[in-house]
Amino acid sequence: MEFLNLGWMEIILILILAFIFLGPDKMVSTGKQIGSWLRKLSRDKLFREVVETTDEIRRYPRKIFDESGLDLPLHVEQQKQQDQSPAVSENLTESQVDKDKPD
């Protein structure tokens, strides 16, 4: 999971550095200020429009392929197969377990 395009390791590093430079008392008050700022930002109409537009731009190539009816590029098909393969193997193991159970 990423937050503001930062992974967990980056967030932990930022928290450690904040603790070192700000100290425990000032870190709490700064955290509250940052939290209130992020809450205001996430409720802002312009920010939501930017996020929706960004998501739409990310989905646009996929939408073009879906509407055109063309075959997907090889790397996209391989990714789809990899995403589906754990589910298929899970279903196989469940069906094998059902077969192995005595009636």
Image (cartoon, rainbow, N blue to C red):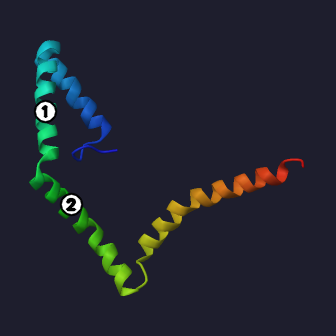
Q: Residue at x 77, y 54 (%)?
A: 96
Q: Residue at x 15, y 38 (%)?
A: 38
Out of 28 and 76, give the one closest to the viewer.
28
Q: Indicate which disc, 1 or 2, sits on the residue closer to the N terminus.
A: 1
Out of 91 and 13, give the one closest to the viewer.
91
Q: Position of residue 34 (x, y in %)?
A: 13, 32
Q: Position of residue 21 (x, y in %)?
A: 12, 20
Q: Please, which residue is most extreme toward the right here? A: 103
Inspect the image, locate mark 2, and give the three-letter code of the amino acid beneath it: Glu
Q: Which residue, given by chain and number where applicable, does mark 1 sit on?
A: 36
User: Do the residues bearing badges 1 and 2 touch, measured as CB atoms within 8 Å?
Assistant: no
Q: Of helix, strand and loop, which one carries label 1? A: helix
Image quadrant holding the N terminus, namely top left
The crowding category of the residue bearing disc 2, from other C-alpha atoms within 10 Å (few below 14, some 14 to 19, many at least 20), is: few
Q: Position of residue 23 (x, y in %)?
A: 14, 15
Image side of residue 37 versus residue 8, left or right: left
Q: Which residue, given by chain and number where applicable, does mark 2 sit on?
A: 52
Out of 34 and 48, give the one closest to the viewer.
48
Inspect the image, locate mark 1, and give the three-letter code of the amino acid beneath it: Ser
